[in-house]
Image (cartoon, rainbow, N blue to C red):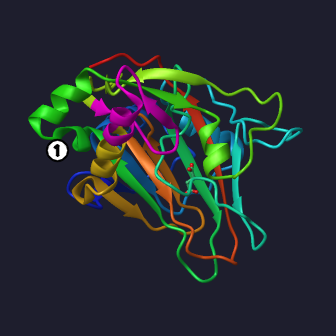
């Protein structure tokens, strides 16, 4: 296997990989590359669902995450269908976010496997490196970030993106996380806030909190050298480090359809850097 870097700082295509038959050596190599490159793109993969789940289990705790968006009664709840149709009012993942950062032990890695692409093209996914965004803060703002914590609220995407309250009885988490966490594998500092889930910065006045939140989020969202834009084709699988990155699905193909399946693995509790 070898890498073809998509940008200097984040994201690589992995050439010569067959994810349906990984031995320990190949799995270890992929784990190492994911820590380095944060987003790995595998083309032309032929995987059944068990093989797809086995890829995700190589990371984090190895325990698969069951997403609140999985339709009740779905036979296998360990994969999340990501479907957009002509009737969709929203596309899952549109807007910068880190998957379920509201959990005390958020997702370590996700594996999204593309099944059907819009005939018109488009439907890319953007990723941004939060280790790189941390590095590119000025010294005073970096120091301040180390002293702050923020509330990540699982109800926010429902209200902001899906424009509804979370269904009654739906379990979702609210967790206060440090603004700078230590990556569980690399130990590197990660800027840990995203527009999808964070509702407020703690320990400052509401006015200060609103301005600080926008300041850090604008830094993240406009830091182009820290971003990569992935183009999909059917049978492409993209693996991302969900602690070191955030992502944004681009919904530029309405009224065409797109369908992918995501398997995610739970990570460890986060600690301050
Ligand atoms: C997601 O947010 O996990 C979905 C990303 C995508 O559909 O490109």
User: What number of labels is visible?
Assistant: 1
- Tell me if 181 is positioned left or right of 86 in this view: left
Query: Quick check: is 194 in the magenta stretch?
Result: yes
**Which corner quadrant of the image does residue 243 belong to?**
top left
Up-down: is 174 above or below 258?
above
Up-down: is 156 above or below 18?
above
Q: Is the CB of the residue bearing disc 1 within 8 angstroms of ligand 1?
A: no
Q: Is residue 62 visible?
A: no
At x 41% / y 19%, what residue is drawn?
Answer: 270
- Tell me if 191 is positioned left or right of 85 in this view: left
At x 25% / y 55%, what residue is drawn?
Answer: 223
Mark 1 sits on what residue? 136
In this view, the residue in front, 260 or 42, is: 260
**Which corner quadrant of the image does residue 64 belong to?**
top right
In this view, the residue in front, 171 or 70, is: 171
Up-down: is 195 above or below 202?
below
Give the SS element for disc 1.
loop
Query: Quick check: is 48 in the magenta stretch?
Result: no
Magenta stretch, residue numbers: 190-212
Give residue 10's position: percent from left, percent from top: 28, 51
Give residue 124's position: percent from left, percent from top: 49, 66
In this view, the residue in front, 221 or 59, is: 221
In this view, the residue in front, 14 or 167, is: 167
Give residue 83's position: percent from left, percent from top: 71, 59
Give residue 265's position: percent from left, percent from top: 56, 31
Up-down: is 45 above or below 69?
below
- Tell me if 71 is positioned left or right of 110 in this view: right
């Amino acid at each position: 296997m070898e890498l073809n870097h998509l940008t200097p700082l984040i994201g690589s295509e992995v050439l010569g990989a067959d994810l349906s038959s990984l031995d320990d050596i190949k799995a270890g190599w992929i784990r190492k590359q994911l820590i380095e490159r944060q987003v790995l793109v595998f083309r032309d993969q032929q995987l059944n669902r068990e093989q797809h789940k086995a890829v995700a289990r190589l990371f984090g705790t190895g325990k698969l995450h069951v997403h609140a968006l999985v339709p009740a009664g779905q036979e296998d709840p360990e994969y999340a269908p990501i479907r957009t149709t002509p009737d969709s009012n929203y596309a899952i993942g549109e807007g910068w976010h880190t998957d379920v950062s509201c959990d005390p032990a958020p997702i370590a890695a996700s594996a999204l496997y593309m099944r059907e692409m819009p005939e018109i093209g488009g439907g890319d996914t953007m990723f941004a490196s939060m280790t790189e965004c941390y590095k590119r803060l000025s010294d005073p703002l970096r120091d301040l970030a180390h002293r702050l914590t923020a509330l990540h609220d699982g109800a926010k995407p429902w209200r902001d993106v899906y424009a509804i309250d979370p269904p009654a009885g739906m379990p979702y988490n609210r967790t206060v996380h440090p603004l700078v966490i230590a990556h569980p594998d690399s130990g590197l500092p990660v800027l840990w806030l995203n527009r999808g889930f964070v509702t407020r910065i703690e320990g400052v006045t509401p006015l200060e909190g609103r301005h600080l939140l926008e300041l850090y989020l604008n830094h993240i969202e406009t830091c182009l050298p820290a971003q990569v834009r992935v183009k999909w084709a059917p049978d492409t699988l993209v693996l991302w480090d969900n602690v070191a990155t955030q992502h944004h699905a681009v919904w530029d193909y309405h009224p065409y359809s797109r369908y992918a399946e995501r398997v995610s693995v739970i990570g460890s509790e986060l600690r301050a850097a």
